[in-house]
Amino acid sequence: MKIALMDSGIGLLAATAAVRRLRPDADLVLSLDPDGMPWGPRTSEDLTQRAVDVADAAAAHRPDALIIGCNTATVHALPTLRARLEPAIPVIGTVPAIKPAAAGGGPVAIWATPATTGSPYQKNLIKDFAGGVSVTEVPCFGLAEAVEHADETAIEAAVAAAAALTPEDVTTVVLGCTHYELVADRIRTAVQRPGFPPLVLHGSAGAVAAQALRRLGEQPAPGAAPNGTLTVLLSGREGPLPAPALAYEEGRLLQAISPAR
């Protein structure tokens, strides 16, 4: 089994690590776009074309499924990529975990990029899945960029700024950008209020990895032999994991995987 994941940068690490833990025997293909990142500021048309190029690079390695490991790319490019690749290659998008977060009753905060915060896309998810629950949209200025570059000072400042915008009574935080899952522990520490129950964080990585297996008719097998290989594509060129990836546990997990031959 071969599963490809795509993103402009290292936001796909969380979902990749989740796939690795569920199926250590699966070959992994990571398709990133260092030549075109970041995707967030691009127009929808431009972003979709970058995503098509990155997906095509992954598809050339004939994966059994493709995960879009980016919320923004899912919003703009999922229909195009599905029309282009399916049914030969199932395409799985990444959606903020608003539905399971709201099921806990709230109050809920959704941490997301400034472009996503307040967007019709996110507003519709809140309306569809979080009716009757108190939801605060929190723009996280510079956090995705700081995580992408493993800039510790910038991460600390961005997390603190977003925590200051998060109401004190929040019990649940939705991590609405895949980059944020790489610093989940720091977000938990910044938002947890003394005397309140333990904060609940909802990311998307585990659900996305499980959905990819379901689309393939496969079951989790975490005890399988860890003989899956890793291929990294950087704007279509084979290369190593970007150096900032190794600042995170998820990146170090992948570094230990043998490269594909």
Image (cartoon, rainbow, N blue to C red):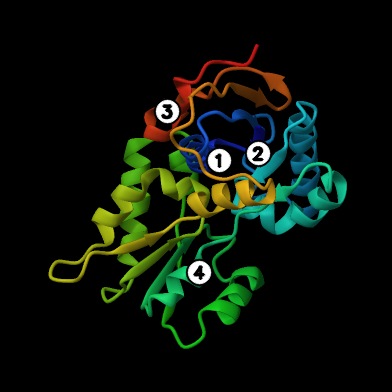
Residue wearing tag 1:
12
Mark 3 or mark 2: whose residue is earlier in sequence: 2
Q: What residue is drawn where x is 40% and y is 70%?
A: 109
Pointers 1 and 4 in contact (C-beta within 8 Å): no
Residue 6 numbered tag = 2
Residue 98 numbered tag = 4
List x then y, in percent, for residue 36: 69, 35
Q: What residue is drawn where x is 37% and y is 78%?
A: 106
Question: Looking at the image, can residue 85 be seen?
Answer: yes
Residue reaching furthest top? 261
Question: Looking at the image, can residue 136 be seen?
Answer: no
Tell me the mark number nearer the camera, choosing from 3 and 1: 3
- In the image, 163: left or right of 129? left
Q: Which kind of residue does numbered mark 1 sit on?
A: Leu
- In the image, 122: left or right of 76? left
Q: Taking 131 as reference, is 213 above or below it?
A: above
Pointers 3 and 1 in contact (C-beta within 8 Å): no
The quarter of the image holding the N terminus is top right
- SS at badge 1: helix
